[in-house]
Amino acid sequence: MQASFPKKEKLKGKKLIDQLFAEGQSVSVFPLRLVYLKTSFEDEVMAKAGVSVSKRNFKTAVDRNRIKRLMREAYRLNKATYFNNLKAQHAFMILYIGKDKPTFAQIEKFMNLLFAKFLCKVSENL
């Protein structure tokens, strides 16, 4: 996996997102939560990801968009380290559930912990 986040790796489509939240499992490392679902895609990507920030906790779009931008960047930089060895295709939704504005260093630290926890959970399910 490259350190890029092209359009084909973005989680889109209402059906898939609804299925993700209905049938998916989750892991949490406060202030992040990862909802994931083992699925299959037509294209050859191993993972599709989306990010979300609650409007309840961050009223202004400026704050929500900044946090989402930080989360996408942390995902982009670290996905190759964690997801190169995935055997099956997965859909991910990364949610920010905290109430205060994070820095990039904080987001990246929690994202690494979240991915490590995800890999532990997936490997013990095999």
Image (tube, helix red, strand yellow):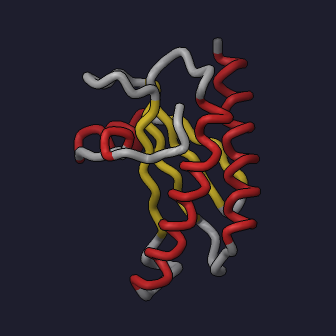
Q: Is residue 41 left or right of residue 122?
A: left
Work out whether residue 75 or residue 114 is closer to the camera in this orientation and state it. 75
Residue drawn 73% across the image and 38% down it: 117
- One can see residue 62 in this view: yes
Work out whether residue 40 or residue 125 is closer to the camera in this orientation and state it. 40
- The answer to whether residue 101 is above or below residue 84 is below
Q: Position of residue 38 (x, y in %)?
A: 46, 25
- One can see residue 18 in this view: no
Q: Quadrant of the C terminus?
A: top right
Residue drawn 23% across the image and 47% down it: 14
Residue drawn 63% across the image and 77% down it: 99
In this view, which residue lies farthest toward the bottom? Answer: 60
Q: Position of residue 107 (x, y in %)?
A: 68, 63
Residue drawn 23% across the image and 40% down it: 15
- The answer to whether residue 46 is above or below residue 30 is above
Q: Is residue 122 left or right of residue 73?
A: right
- The answer to whether residue 76 is above or below residue 88 is below
- The answer to whether residue 12 is above or below residue 47 is below
Q: Position of residue 82 (x, y in %)?
A: 66, 33
State the image quarter where residue 125 is shown: top right
